Amino acid sequence: MEKKHLYILWTNADPITAKLMVFMYSTNAMLRGWWEEVTVCIWGAPTKLVSEDKEIQEYIKKAQEAGVKFEACIACARELGVIEDLENLGIKVFSWGPELTDRLKNDDKLLTI
């Protein structure tokens, strides 16, 4: 069975990597039909970047308009005090540890940045 959902685990807070890899690939993957679904999980340092950087927030909005889903690790967001900031951007915040474990055990397509 062909996997049609790509998960991108985004753990690198470098804004250039975010713009030229995470957002470029995820947005184009949806716009060009490379994947039926793309979900970006924000985990670790990018949590703070997303909550503070207006340009990164604009990239998220454009990706969401293309159909990319964004989720975030609640433990990271809680530690950094940004749960509400992320939720206001339309990002689903929850315990992603069990989700990641399921994705790995199911051999889902997971790209780690």
Image (cartoon, grey):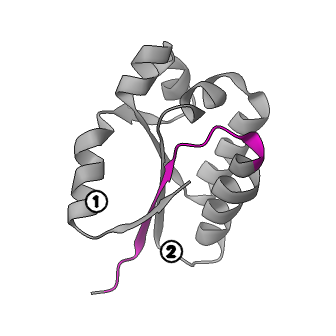
13 in the magenta segment: yes
94 lies above or below 9: above
Residue that carries the numbered disc 1 in the rendered image? 103
Locate residue 105: give its quadrant.
bottom left
Residue range (magenta): 2-16
Q: Earlier in the sequence, mark 1 or mark 2?
A: 2
Percent position of residue 34, x then y: 56, 78
Residue at point 52%, 35% (across, down): 90
Tell me which amino acid carries mark 2.
Answer: Trp
31 lies above or below 89: below
71 in the magenta segment: no
Locate residue 58: give its quadrant.
top right
Residue at point 69%, 22% (across, down): 52
Q: Secondary structure at mark 1?
A: helix
Percent position of residue 78, x then y: 40, 17
22 lies above or below 71: below
